[in-house]
Image: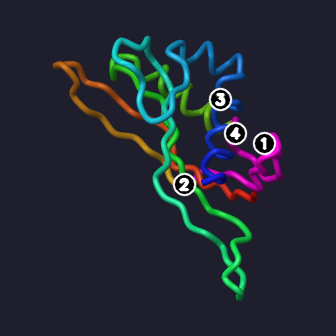
Amino acid sequence: MGELAIVQSYLDTTLKQDATLKTLAPGGVWRDIAPAGTKTPYVVFTMVAGSDALTGNVARIMTQVYMQVKGVGPTSNYVALISVADRIDTLLKRTGPVTVGSLGGVVACWREQLIAYGEVNESVMWSHLGGLYHLQVKV
């Protein structure tokens, strides 16, 4: 599962260290779920799927990881969520390799799909806006 550690570290570092995103999403960046009472909007990322690229001898040479990365907040603040999603996309448009410590690296990253949906939470309409990102990872 070293590939997942690489992806999580890459997203954590890339998203949390960006001053613009910190301003746009004062609730911060979270893996999987934000704690109750988190300031909004905030960013959440979670793994959706993954698959291995293998050689003819069934040796893993690369892993494809799909991560959902989105801004979350009340629908009444939808304009702010658009800015958050745009900033996420700007940060994750990567075509060249990025080394992540001694673990390995992200070879490439791009958005595969747009994500936009709503839900009702305690009688308040919430929106989720972002994307499904495809990351190619090599250990």
> For the residues marked 1 and 4, what is the alpha-carbon distance in whole angstroms?
7 Å
Residue bounds of the magenta highlight? 91-111
Give the residue drawn at x 58%, y 56%: 65
Mark positioned earlier in the residue sequence (4 or 3): 4
Q: Mark 1 points at which residue?
A: 100
Q: Which amino acid does label 3 sit on?
A: Leu
Q: Name which quarter of the figure residue 93 lies in.
A: top right
Secondary element at tag 2: strand
Secondary element at tag 3: helix
Q: Which mark is residue 15?
A: 3
> For the residues marked 3 and 1, what is the alpha-carbon distance in whole angstroms?
14 Å
Pointers 1 and 4 in contact (C-beta within 8 Å):
yes
Mark positioned earlier in the residue sequence (4 or 2): 4
Mark positioned earlier in the residue sequence (1 or 4): 4
Q: Mark 4 points at which residue?
A: 10
> For the residues marked 4 and 3, what is the alpha-carbon distance in whole angstroms?
8 Å
Q: Does the magenta stretch include residue 60?
A: no
Mark positioned earlier in the residue sequence (2 or 1): 2
Q: Which amino acid does label 4 sit on?
A: Tyr
Q: In this view, does 23 lie above or below 47?
A: above
Residue 71 x/y as whole percent = 48, 29
Q: Which amino acid does label 1 sit on?
A: Val
Mark positioned earlier in the residue sequence (3 or 1): 3
Pointers 3 and 1 in contact (C-beta within 8 Å):
no
Within-10-Å neighbours for mark 3: few <14, some 14–19, many 20+? many
Q: Mark 2 points at which residue?
A: 66
Mark positioned earlier in the residue sequence (2 or 3): 3
